Image (cartoon, rainbow, N blue to C red):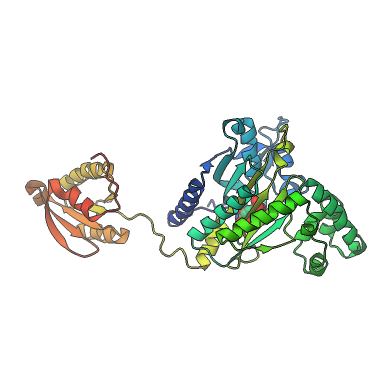
Amino acid sequence: MKFQTITGTKDILPSESPLWQHVEKTARSVFERFGYREIRTPIFEDTNLFLRGIGETTDIVGKEMYTFKPSPESDESLTLRPEMTASVMRAYLQHSLGAQSPVVKVYYISELFRKERPQKGRYRQFWQFGAECIGSSLPEADAEVIAMMMMIYDELGIKNTMLKLNSLGDIETRKRYRAILQDYLRPHFDKLDSVSKERFEKNPLRILDSKNPDLKELIENAPRILDHLDETSQAHFETVKSYLDEFGVKYVIDHRLVRGLDYYTRTAFELVSADLGAQDALGGGGRYDGLAEQLGAEKEISAVGFASGVERLLIAMQSANLIANIQPKKPDVMLVSQSPAARGWIMKVANEWRKAGLAVETDLLARSLKAQLREANRLGATYAVIVGEYELQTGKFQLKNLLTSEQKEIQQENLLNEIRKQNRSIVLTKN
Ligand code: AMP
């Protein structure tokens, strides 16, 4: 029997991991410059956390969660996390993080699980990096979160994107707008598709999300939430936009960008890429001042955040030819053995040099001299040192630079320093 990965999941192979590490390193570096600290939460949680924290009318909760019982007789229901915001807010409340710091800024790089029909850019297990800023209601927090997300894409070289922006107002705005939208749609009810009909009562704002081309005109002409904002939300939105202008972050207003849930407030945004196919959203986020109360907090806790898909980012990087230069770390030196005695010496020296910070390769197959040198070239090693009886007896070694083909005779005690001298990227350790 041959085992294979499950549909919708994938291996990240050693040939791909340098790219993942590059993305993660860039994201971490930007997050830390903004003062965000990493949070890691368990992969599974109480199912109710997601029912309350994402909302029962969403596709995620409706049909995409991997839910299971810890044992057949248990009353408990557990779910593999389909997103991170609810888990982060749960951790914030559980550990009273707000008591330690009035504004809590955290980031994550996590794998998530959704029972979706897999296609390019859509998987059942996928990765997101994202951040949550909890405790500030000011528009500065929204602007900073958006700028941070955009800086990560910028530093990865991603272009060809469009940032969509909208405001959903406060909870009262949305209640009012919901009625206005229903009044507008009611005379056209028969024209709606079955999904939209179902959303009409439960969650009419999400009808604006519909990708059905038959509804395009109807949705285009719908009343816009921005025309119905309360005064405070209006001012908040203006300030967010003016900061983005100041940062040089370009955006378009998209009145269709709505989040159908009550605890989303004010700013909503999404970044789409022209280098992706049907699944063109790279990431998105917004303000969710009502979530904490939804999860049992006694008062409203302001928060804003974003989440970005890593697989889609990599697809976009690939189509923009941004990954050619990202290489795995290459060995500094390969120690090549010509005899069993040399192998013993190499084992000991390789271990010492690795401790001293060098990337050292050795032969683990007792191959011929020629085959070992071929391997050193294949791995892209900078140097090779050939070790035989003569070298061990005299303490004189030939240091061969495989990139320039230069060769120098070096005394044993100077070898390590000579290799280090040539390689400025090596951080010197205590040796
Ligand atoms: P969401 O949490 O649905 O707002 O998604 C945020 C981002 O995560 C999206 O813009 C995508 O880049 C990514 N994403 C969401 N669902 C998937 C999936 N099933 N497979 C791969 N990436 C996904």
Observer-nearest residue: 150 or 423? 150
- Residue 122 showing in the rendered view: no
Image quadrant in which you'd find residue 79: top right
Observer-nearest residue: 62 or 251? 251
Image quadrant in which you'd find residue 269: bottom right
**Horizontal and vertical percent for residue 363?**
26, 51
Give above or below for 101 relative to 193: above
**Horizontal and vertical percent for residue 314?**
52, 60
Number of residue marks: 0
Observer-nearest residue: 358 or 177? 177
**Horizontal and vertical percent for residue 333?**
25, 53
**Horizontal and vertical percent for residue 374?**
26, 61
Quick check: which quadrant has ligand 1?
Answer: bottom right
Q: In this view, does 386 lie to the left or right of 260?
A: left
Give above or below for 381 relative to 32: below
Q: Residue at x 21, y 60 (%)?
A: 401
Q: Which residue is drawn at 71% across and 30% down?
A: 74
- Residue 360 showing in the rendered view: yes
Which quadrant of the figure contains the C terminus?
A: top left
* Residue at the extreme right: 187
Q: Residue at x 74, y 38 (%)?
A: 294
Q: In this view, does 430 lie to the left or right of 322?
A: left
Q: Which residue is drawn at 60% across and 61% down?
A: 245
Observer-nearest residue: 77 or 319? 319
Q: In this view, does 232 lie to the left or right of 246?
A: right
